[in-house]
Image (cartoon, rainbow, N blue to C red):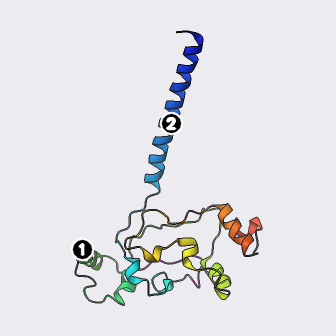
Amino acid sequence: MTGNNKTSWMKIVIVCIFAGMLGIGYKWYSKRTMVVQPIQFNHLKHNKLSCEICHPGILKKAKAGLPSISLCANCHATSPDLSETGKKWWIYFLNKDPEIVPWQPLYSVPKHAYFSHRRHLSIASKEKLLSCPVCHGDIHKTERIPQKRLVNFSMEKCRRCHRYWKVSTDCTACHR
């Protein structure tokens, strides 16, 4: 092999190794970000209800709540669903703590950042500027809870929104 052929061969090997590492990394990352819920909740069936009925605290607290079995039982006091999934769900959770459903958060904020549902919704809803789908996508149209976020967040996305609505972009407003 000449020196030039050897260099070309090495470049091909390096590109293949790099591409393989990217593929493995993507597969690992996409699995890591998938969320599996204990119940395949149908938002579409419930979308006539306001979000705060099932997610208590979104108007009064920094963090939105997730529904408990006792909250579900307010409407579904008797067999909530005659499907196999509904029966399994009901039997499983009646034998558990009625306040705890092991929901896995689909959306989260990095530890170094602060986000308050109460603040965003109380300020923005006065002007009808912000509704749940702006940040959470069309979750209200889903028949199964997605395994991944419908909307991906980044600091730049938040900054664009803040600039658009002419609210503070001061770093200390969100970063603690």
Residue shown at 30% from the left, 89% from the top: 77
Residue 78 in picture, x, y percent from top left: 26, 89
Q: Main secondary structure of the magenta part?
A: loop
Q: Quadrant of residue 83?
A: bottom left
Bounds of the magenta segment: 59-68
Q: Nearer the viewer, residue 77 or 25?
A: 25
Q: Is residue 99 visible?
A: no
**In terms of secondary structure, where does tag 2 sit?**
helix
Question: Which amino acid is tagged 2?
Answer: Ala
Is residue 169 rendered magenta in the image?
no
- Whichever of labels 2 and 1 marks the residue nearer the N terminus, that label is 2
Residue 88 placement (x, y as % from top left): 24, 74
Q: Residue at x 51, y 25 (%)?
A: 13
Q: Amino acid at mark 1?
A: Lys
Residue nearest the viewer, comparing 19 with 73: 19
Name the image quarter holding the C terminus: bottom right
Question: Mark 2 = which residue?
Answer: 19
At x 58% / y 18%, what residue is drawn? 7
* Residue at the image point whose x is 65% and y is 80% from the top: 119
Per the image, the residue denoted by label 1 is 88
Q: Quadrant of residue 124?
A: bottom right
Estimate how packed mark 2 is, as few (under 14), some (14 to 19) or many (20 or more) residues with alpha carbons within 10 Å: few
Give residue 112's position: percent from left, percent from top.
65, 62
Q: Residues within 10 Å of mark 1 (few under 14, many from 20)?
A: few
